[in-house]
Image (cartoon, helix red, strand yellow):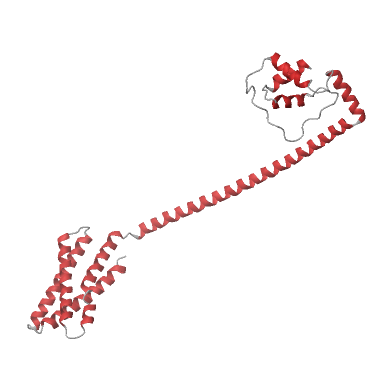
């Protein structure tokens, strides 16, 4: 688990150490004996490596020291400063030396990334457990989506079946009502049945229009609210009903009387209106 970040850090560190040592020996070797320059270069690299080793030891123990980290970055900045100073004083290839002057800081940054990797690394067992949990969650979500889609499809099919059944029932009922209406109309307009029905109606309700009224077929007006206005007494209601009924000759039927009664602005329940009709008729 450590190789993806440890190997780049080790490689850049090695290049940085060699480059720092070579630059110190070449740069300071002209002003002092080369063994002294070698010692200076080894001192910079040694301090860099010592602080790095101590940081790695603390990290392995799960500990951290801010002072050691600060010293390590100080050695890195020192090495970088030496490389930059050499590049600026070099008679040739200044750009090339500046291009590699950042390597000590890059090595420190890579070791920082490696430390973060180690603190967040998990064992293969833990990774396998996490993968299993995620897969289980995905499976449950997929099953839930499939169940919802199936239930929605079933509900849609059920609603379609209910709608079609309702349409069939409505068509059958309408057909039966139409047939019954045709039968009633034929009985009403028939010569023999018309006389028989007129005879029966006349005997039951004398002085009433001797014409048998068919039931209402089609849209009807909704009933007004019961006793929506000031309630009429039975005597007043009977007087109004009688006046409307006898306003034409022959006398109006109950349905025509009721229509004119409500159109005139009067208010009475259907039960009281029929009772008044029976009393005056």
> Where is residue 243 drawn, in percent x and y?
75, 19
| Residue nearest the observer in this picture, 221 or 58 | 221
Q: Residue at x 77, y 21 (%)?
A: 245
In the image, taking residue 12 as reference, residue 191 lies left or right, namely: right
Task: Residue 170: tell me if it is visible.
Answer: yes
Q: Residue at x 76, y 38 (%)?
A: 174
Q: How many marks?
A: 0
The residue lying furthest to the top in this view is 235
Q: Residue at x 30, y 59 (%)?
A: 120
- Name which quarter of the figure residue 186 lies in: top right
> Where is residue 109 drawn, in percent x and y?
24, 67
Examine the rendered structure and indicate whether residue 60 appears above or below residue 247.
Answer: below
In the image, taking residue 183 as reference, residue 52 lies left or right, namely: left
In which quadrant will I find the N terminus?
bottom left
| Residue nearest the observer in this picture, 195 or 239 | 239
- Name which quarter of the figure residue 126 lies in: bottom left
> Where is residue 19 drawn, in percent x and y?
19, 78
- Name which quarter of the figure residue 68 lies in: bottom left
> Where is residue 116 drawn, in percent x and y?
27, 62
In which quadrant will I find the C terminus?
top right
Q: Residue at x 71, y 20 (%)?
A: 273
């Amino acid at each position: 688990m450590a190789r993806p970040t440890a190997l780049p850090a080790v490689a850049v560190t090695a290049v940085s150490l060699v480059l720092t040592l070579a630059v110190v020996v070449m740069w300071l070797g002209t002003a002092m004996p080369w063994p002294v320059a070698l010692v200076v270069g080894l001192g910079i690299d040694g301090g860099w490596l010592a602080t790095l080793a101590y940081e790695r030891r603390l990290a392995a123990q799960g500990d951290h020291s801010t002072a050691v980290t600060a010293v390590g970055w100080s050695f890195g900045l020192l090495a970088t400063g030496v490389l930059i100073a050499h590049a600026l004083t070099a008679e040739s290839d200044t750009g090339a030396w500046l291009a590699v002057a950042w390597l000590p800081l890059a090595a420190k940054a890579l070791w920082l990334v490696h430390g973060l990797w180690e603190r967040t690394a998990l064992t293969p067992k833990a990774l396998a457990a996490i993968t299993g949990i995620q897969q289980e969650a995905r499976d449950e979500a997929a099953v839930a989506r499939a169940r919802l889609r199936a239930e929605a499809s079933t509900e849609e099919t059920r609603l379609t079946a209910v709608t079609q059944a309702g349409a069939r029932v409505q068509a059958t009922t309408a057909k039966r009502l139409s047939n019954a209406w045709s039968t009633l109309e034929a009985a009403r307009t028939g010569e023999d049945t018309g006389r028989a029905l007129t005879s029966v109606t006349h005997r039951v309700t004398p002085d009433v229009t001797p014409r048998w009224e068919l039931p209402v077929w089609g849209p009807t007006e909704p009933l007004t609210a019961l006793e929506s206005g000031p309630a009429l007494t039975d005597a007043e209601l009977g007087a109004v009903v009688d006046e409307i009924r006898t306003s034409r000759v022959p006398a109006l039927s109950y349905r025509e009387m009721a229509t004119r009664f409500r159109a005139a602005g009067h208010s009475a329940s259907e039960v009281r209106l029929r009772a008044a009709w029976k009393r005056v008729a």
